[in-house]
Image (cartoon, helix red, strand yellow):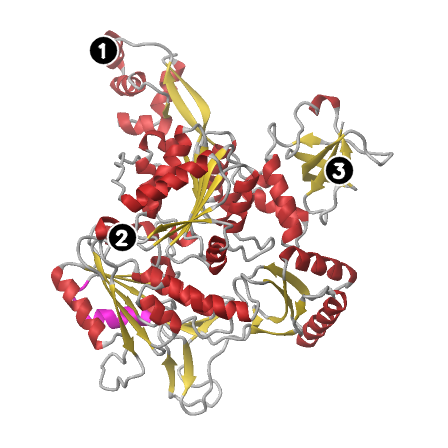
Amino acid sequence: MFVRVLPDQAAGRLLDYSVPDHMQSAVGIGSRVQVPVRTRLLHGTVIEILEQSEFAKVRDIAALVDEKPMIRPALLDLARWMSDYYCCPLETAVRSVLPVAVRDGKVGAKMQNIVRATRTFSEDDFVAIARRAPRQADALRVVAQSEEPLLVTEAAKKAGVNEGVFRTLEKHGFVVIEASVVSRNPYAERFIAGAELTLNAEQQAAMGVVVQTMEKPEKPILLFGVTGSGKTEIYLRAIRHALDSGKTALVLVPEIALTPQTVERFKSRFAEVQDQIAVLHSHLSEGERHDEWHKIHNGSARVVIGARSSIFAPIENPGIIIVDEEHENSYKQDEAPRYNARDMAVLRGKRENAAVLLGSATPSLESWHNAQTGKYQLVRLDQRVDDKSMPVVRITDLRRPTRNDPEGGILSRSLRQAVEGRILKGEQTILFLNRRGFSTSMICEACGHVCQCPDCSVSLTYHRAAERLMCHICGHSRRAPKSCPKCSDPKIRFSGTGTQKVEEALKRIFPKARIARMDADSMTRKESYRETLGAFKEGRIDILLGTQMIAKGLHFPNVTLVGIVNADLGLHVPDFRAGERTFQLLTQVAGRAGRGEMEGEVFVQTFTPFSPSIQFARHHDFEGFMEQEMEFRKRFDYPPFGRMVMITLRGVAREKVEFSAQTLSRKLKNSAPQGVLIGEGVPAPLEKAKTYYRFQVSLRGPSSLQLSRLIRSTLAALPMPEDVFVAVDVDPLHLM
């Protein structure tokens, strides 16, 4: 028996090995093995089983790392497809399928001592033991009366004794103490069963289509539902149908939406099987991720909820794969392989005969186009549940002079009055600004000097709490200067507004209000997110201020006002998707208002009030925006009408990177088939980041796979300088 193995850290080479007789029954496709590569022993993955090898001398596998194959064949096939489509080495694609917490073997199962009674004890036994050792009797009673073995630490706590008492009981033969594997459960608390909500007519019709598709999967479903229309209830019922059919379910949510509120909603609905729900995301510890993954791998978990990488969860027999907020940028991986988890969900569903449900109030242009052309089934939810009205959206033009405003126009007069009214009525407000820090830059009024990061082509952001200037690209930090570093003038001042500055203004304007800020600077502890949202849910916070982590997926019925402090951030960047992203973000943030009994109101502050993105969002007109945006994309052959790949080259020597980019562009043009457009090698919009200069070459054509293969063959024939690094992004979402 021979196998083809992909060793880790071996430049992606596939090597043949023979399998010793005693291992042959255990080795299969996806098995992790230890193999000799020259003078080293490396871990690797079995990619293929061979009857014969074409090589005369083949070495033996040294050892089998795990008894059961770690990667299912279906996921291995997905990795092969990713390698080809996303133009990355197979080893890189396989690494993404098997998480590092499992792959390197450094994190193992957690062992703890458990204690159980050796026999049944009567009350007379306890009395007899209590005469000579009362504490031993108390400890033994706790263990004997437990139906299941207890952790020694837990038993000691219940009995009010130290752990040494159980060792004494063990010497007397009353109990047995043994090591046992203990699961590190990130959501160990028990949830009370939640009742199913009554479906309205739209939801019932949608559920009928979902069930029909689950019985006979053909096309993915795009569930287009306005904010607050009850999409989550459809997800929950679809999962229930999968479980009742003896199948499993996989639910993807954006990283920022994977809040305790989301987990609680799912676990409470499936309270009777909540131990069969696994959660995977980047905020788990390595140990928690290891245990949750193995819970899925060994079949203990039948429902998986997770962020982007969860699309590769080793779940078997999936009945449905759900992608919530399918338009979200966080589904796109920013390192090789640069996959989009939404697209992987569609592909995995097709390969494993599972229904795929993509949900959003603001679908991506690609998904909307697929629904319009018949590739996806379109299911609509046009009304909020219980016929609640959509919030009223008011536009505030920030171009009007605000010199008499003591707060410098951070909050308009109308927004301030609206917030004050909500505080008096005991209602809650969400304020959104997608920029953290205190001020976006420091600028000298005398000479115009702006404090910039030495390693990136961006200005430094002032963080008041630490009195420091920080770069949000590379993390560079230094003390804020008292005078201009260039001309020494003391008139250097702060410019622009971040969440810290808004928080300070809110405390001055509303001194009695309870205010909380949620951004990457304030949510540093693991439990910060959970605690802040918990306090907001319980009404202990009047105003919640934050970045995009509060923009989506949250359901707080007492929120009747949403204020968008500056709607223009992200609108005027050199990226053809800028308008789409702004429209989606404004619509999603506005959707947090008016989800309870009271009507919602949204204030949008902007310097460009007549921007189509803002006006269409104001009128909740998704289809109007889509029609206009589609026309623009079609005219220039941008996605979804054409395919795009962005190649980014980076290095510390600007001239060398520029020359390499221009040479690559020229070589691609020489080999490109008809209909493929190759751009010049030009500086990236963010030309310098983390000390590296960056140049880009863009490609557009009718097929992503065609572009990937052109790039792969061109790069194979064009050796790059050692200090110039190349990144290929197929179907890019950001062009910066």
Label of residue 127 in the image: 1
Looking at the image, tell me whether mark 1 or mark 3 is earlier in sequence order: 3
Please tell me whether residue 482 belongs to the stretch shown in magenta.
no
Work out which residue is located at the far right of the displayed protein and give it. 56
Query: Is residue 647 in sight in this rendering?
Result: yes
Q: From this view, report whether residue 443 is shown above or below residue 170.
A: below
Amino acid on which disc 3 is placed: Pro
* Residue beneath disc 2: 384
**Tag 2 or tag 1, which sits nearer the N-term?**
1
Kindly tell me whether residue 162 is visible in this rendering: no
Tell me, for residue 36, which label it has, or none: 3
- Quarter containing the C terminus: bottom right
Q: Which of disc 3 and disc 2 is earlier in sequence?
A: 3
Q: Is residue 498 left or right of residue 370?
A: left
Q: x, y (%) of residue 74?
A: 59, 37
In magenta, the rendered stretch is 500-513
Identity, as a three-letter code, of the amino acid under mark 1: Val
Instruction: Give yes or no for contact between labels 1 and 2 (Cβ–Cβ under 8 Å).
Output: no
Spatial distance from mark 1 to mark 3, Cα to Cα? 64 Å
Disc on res. 200? none
